[in-house]
Amino acid sequence: MSARHDSTPPSSLQAGRRTFLGNTAALMIMQAVKFLFPLVTLPYLARVLEPDAYAVRAYVVSYMVFIQTLIDFGFAQYGTKLIAENAHDPQAMSSISTDVFIAKLLLALLGAAITLASAAFIPILGDNLAFVALSFGAIAAKSLLPDFVLQGLENMKAIAVRFSITQVIAVILIFLFVKKPSQLNLIAAFEGMASVVALAWTVAYLKGNYRIGIGRISVSKTRKIIAGSTPFFISLAASALMSSTATVLMGVFQTDALVISCWTIATTVIQGVQALWQPVTRSLFPHMVKRRDISLVRKLLIVGTPIAIAIAAACHFAASWIVLVMGGEEYVAGSYILSYAVLVLPFSYPIAVIGYPITGAIGRASELSACIGIAGGVQLVFLVAAGLAGAFSVEVALIARIGSEALLLVLEAFVARRTIKRIHGTQPIGETS
């Protein structure tokens, strides 16, 4: 008997798995472009911007992770879930899409106010207001993209095609026009242009192919959308803390520009590796919402975890060469940061697979939020305490980052197992039903 923990007919489950594989393949192509984007531009920008301007860009990009998390507010997950549950009702999907868009606009205004206030207290933001404003505009436009609709419809190909074309245009513009540190603002302008084009493209595509347009604006429904997205937002905010807090605190505690740059190079490499399994988890989420295919999750863990460990080992031993290629000789002295930072990878793959695709998709997002909140909170308290005690260093940041990731894996595995048992009795993951 096949290992399956739901009542989905075998033919329907197999069709769903074929859709999952097709979506994963499309997103892999997109992630290849997303990986190549920094791989191609980072060495170029590290050289033409020089360490001081590059550190500004690195810091602002890390700060904008928080702003994007605020505007997204878990809509990518909760919105995807709602669309997947209403995939045959264009009117309902139009209403959901409109409510999410209005909510994001309100949060974008809040993000703008927070950014202005932050610039008054964080010198690296206040001294580069034009670049911060342009970067905020790019992130806001990107956050307004209704990709959650396409994800809920399990049409990842449309996302991949649009992303690939707009990002290639942005890269070409950067190479053509950015030649020196004083042209830093052009980078954010080109990225913002790509986001605006992508937004217009997606809105037109949904209208033409799915009859999803502007629904009736409802304050009460918008409030419900925000309430339903809140558990996802909490977990995403905590995740952003785990991945970006160290970089932000480096600016607060005045770590030198070279260390920030090397940390950012390491973060870019790690994010590039993590992009390899994002197609799997993004395609898996709507699949699990509709089908609760636990046995597929088990197979993905068995196949993918050893690959993540092997990639981490390869990056550890090749750290100096990677940093040389990514940044140049002046950054090689900080290659030890990358060699240890990649130790998060063996934890991050299973975290990605068992998080949203199990606990979030089945409706236990609040428990997932608690797990990430605890791990992120432990890391934040540890780093702030070290900073206040005058002991903040890149070594301390590495310990906090790796330790919090290991803690999160333990917590998520416990909650995921309990969630499955709650629904399917006491059967462990992957046993035959």
Image (cartoon, rainbow, N blue to C red):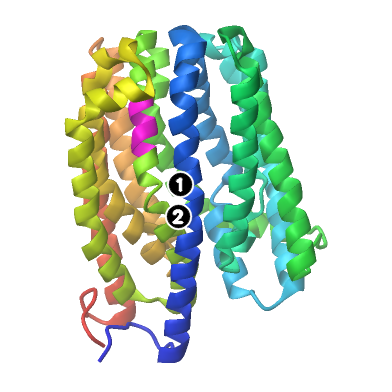
Instruction: Identify which residue, 137 or 317, lies in the foreground.
Output: 317
Cβ–Cβ under 8 Å for marks 2 and 1: yes
Residue under pointer 1? 32
Residue under pointer 2? 28
Q: Inspect the magenta stretch and tell me whether residue 269 lies in it.
A: yes
Question: How many C-alpha atoms fall within 10 Å of the one at disc 2: few (<14), some, or many (≥20)?
Answer: many
| Whether residue 59 is visible | no
Q: Tell me the residue at 43%/38% (across/down).
A: 240
Magenta region, residue range: 265-271
Work out whether 166 lies above or below 122: below
Amino acid tagged 1: Ala
Q: Tell me the residue at 22%/41% (across/down).
A: 312
Q: Tell me the residue at 26%/43% (across/down).
A: 345
Residue 3 lies, in percent from the top left, at 27, 83
Residue 178 lies, in percent from the top left, at 61, 17
What is the magenta segment's predominant secondary structure? helix
Residue 397 lies, in percent from the top left, at 27, 24
The Cα–Cα distance between marks 2 and 1, rounded to whole angstroms, is: 6 Å
Amino acid tagged 2: Met
